[in-house]
């Protein structure tokens, strides 16, 4: 008959739970956390797997809120709980803070206001009526060039404007860099008409 070996046959002593399940009358380990309420999302209950599933199935974040409060919460969450402001509010104020060497953004308030209050943007007056300038017409204003013109004339004018407005030629001036961006965009617009 073999003698029992205490070192191999002995069962290890059960380890005590780190946390017990907080559900009433449950003796299992509370290994899964669940928020106590929507106002204290960093304070938790600790449940076993079965009871955390039960708790999560019954969880309602909006419980106790009125319809108006729910709508406000949804609107607030839609913008990731960050402040918002009306469209154009920031750019309209900033428009007067930079130099517009080509007068692309300059607009005569009296000319732009039509019978219905007018619309923003550069306009061209034709026989007492106004029409908004096309992208190509704006690009030609930047280049100070009139149609008809050839691709070679456009390239020559582009080289001249790049030399004049390149930031390296202007001591790294940010305004020159912005003018060069306008020139590059206008060149891309006009060059597309020759392709």
Image (cartoon, rainbow, N blue to C red):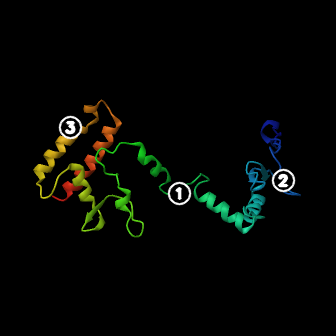
- Which residue in the protein does label 3 denote? 163
Q: Examine the image and state in which quarter residue 59 appears.
A: bottom right
Q: Examine the image and state in which quarter residue 54 appears.
A: bottom right
> Which numbered disc covers residue 86?
1
Q: Nearer the viewer, mark 3 or mark 2?
A: 3
- Which residue in the protein does label 2 denote? 22
Helix, strand or loop at mark 2:
loop
Q: Position of residue 72 (x, y in %)?
A: 67, 62
Helix, strand or loop at mark 3:
helix
Please indicate, yes or no, whether residue 71 appears anywhere in the rendered image. Answer: yes
| Contact check, label 1 and label 3, Cβ < 8 Å | no
> Which numbered disc covers residue 62?
none
Q: CA distance from mark 2 to mark 1?
A: 48 Å
Q: Position of residue 63 (x, y in %)?
A: 76, 64
- Position of 80 compared to 184: left or right? right
Helix, strand or loop at mark 1:
loop
Q: Seen from this angle, which residue lies furthest right? A: 25
Q: Nearer the viewer, mark 2 or mark 1?
A: 1
Q: CA distance from mark 1 to mark 3?
A: 39 Å
């Amino acid at each position: 008959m073999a003698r029992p070996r205490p070192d191999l046959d002995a069962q290890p002593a059960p380890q005590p739970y780190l946390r017990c399940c907080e559900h009433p009358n449950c003796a299992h380990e509370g290994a899964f956390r669940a928020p106590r309420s929507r106002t204290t999302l960093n304070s938790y209950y600790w449940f076993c797997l079965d009871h955390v599933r039960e708790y999560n199935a019954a969880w309602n974040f909006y419980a106790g809120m009125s319809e108006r409060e729910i709508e406000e919460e949804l609107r607030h969450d839609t913008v990731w709980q960050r402040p918002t402001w009306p469209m154009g509010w920031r750019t309209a104020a900033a428009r007067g803070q930079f130099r517009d060497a080509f007068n692309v953004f300059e607009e005569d308030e009296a000319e732009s206001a039509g019978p219905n209050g007018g619309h923003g943007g550069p306009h061209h007056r034709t026989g007492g009526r106004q029409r908004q300038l096309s992208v190509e017409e704006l690009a030609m204003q930047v280049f100070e060039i009139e149609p008809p013109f050839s691709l070679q004339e456009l390239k020559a004018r582009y080289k001249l404007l790049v030399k004049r407005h390149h930031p390296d030629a202007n001591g790294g001036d940010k305004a020159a860099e912005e003018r060069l961006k306008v020139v590059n965009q206008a060149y891309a617009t006009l060059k597309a008409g020759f392709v």
